Amino acid sequence: MKNLPMDLLRAFVSVAQLNSFTKAGELLGRSQPAVSLQIQRLEELVDETLLVRNGKNLELSEAGENLYDYANQILSLNDLAISQLSKSTITGKIRLGIPSEFATVLLPKIVSRFAKAYPNVTLEVNCELSKTLLSKEGKASHDLILALEDNPSKTGLKTGSSLVKTDELVWVASSDHNAQKVEVVPLIAAAEGCIYRQRAIKLLDRSKQPWQIVYTIPDLTGIQYAIQEGLGVTVLAKSTVPENLKILTPRARFPELGEVGISLICSARNKKNEAVHLLIEFLKTSLT
């Protein structure tokens, strides 16, 4: 029987998620050639081509798609087993800041898993706009911050910032709302300073598409209810779109929105904090 090495699977999943050998290397602390070699070794082991290049994009082959789901399950079980076995030695309190838009998706998953694995570590979670979290005061009041960054290509230049993944921004509406026919785009958005809001307005203006803010609310749950009532459309990271809402196909009225970076910022005083580093791994696993 062949065994699938965990480090090869982690490299494969990282490359597939980030669509880049270089970004995967930055995440894993390896060089681009080293990650390429890991993928090559994995392909030789399974005797299949897992990744194919389509222009500038990397895509999963049919075999790659099949392995991807198994790889995620294997990595999740591995990480959970390791955390369970080492939980007795970890204690402390972590002040975590996350974007309001991610609270509904991430909090139940992360808090429940982390609390079970490390019952002696207390999580104090604060949900704010990324702009607020990344302010001087925000960084000072948190041990670890998960934040959205408008220009992920420059993330690596920021001290203490580690790009976890990029996520596509999409237009979202209610499942029965025909938003394509509206003349003035009715926007539901968070307050000023929200990256989603800024990106939507910038690209609507660029395409000369009239728009109007019809509803402002800071959290995803409130935005979700407003969309369900047919009040308008919003912009979300694709990975956070609730199942009962639909993603709109980009058109002239709804231009392509590009991507945002999702990064982790660890305060300098916590560089050697074991509990913080374990939470970082939990966050990376949950996001990727």
Image (spheres, helix red, strand yellow):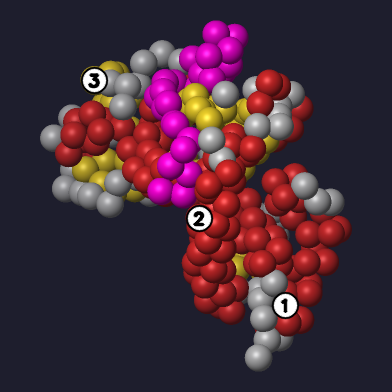
Corner quadrant of residue 114: top left
Q: Residue at x 70, y 46 (%)?
A: 27
Q: Which mark is residue 214?
A: 3
Q: Earlier in the sequence, mark 1 or mark 3?
A: 1
User: Against 159, is 252 above or below?
Assistant: below
Query: Is 62 positioned to the left or the right of 226 in the image?
Result: right
Residue 72, x across and y down, in percent:
53, 64
Residue picked out by circle 1: 43
Q: Specify start and end residues of the magenta stretch as a single range.
A: 116-142
In what quadrant of the picture does the N terminus appear? Answer: bottom right
Most distant residue in the top direction: 137
Which secondary structure, mark 3?
Answer: strand
Most distant residue in the bottom direction: 1
Q: Residues within 10 Å of mark 2 (few under 14, many from 20)?
A: some
Query: Is 193 positioned to the left or the right of 29 in the image?
Result: left
Residue 122, x across and y down, in percent:
44, 32
Query: Is 52 positioned to the left or the right of 139 in the image?
Result: right
Tag 3 near tag 2, CB within 8 Å: no
Q: Nearer the viewer, mark 1 or mark 2?
A: 2
Q: CA distance from mark 1 to mark 3?
A: 51 Å
Tag 1 near tag 2, CB within 8 Å: no
Q: Residues within 10 Å of mark 3 (few under 14, many from 20)?
A: some
Q: Which mark is residue 84?
A: 2
Which secondary structure, mark 2?
Answer: helix
Q: Residue at x 32, y 22 (%)?
A: 218
Front one among 35 and 20: 35
Q: Earlier in the sequence, mark 1 or mark 2?
A: 1
Three-letter code, disc 3: Val
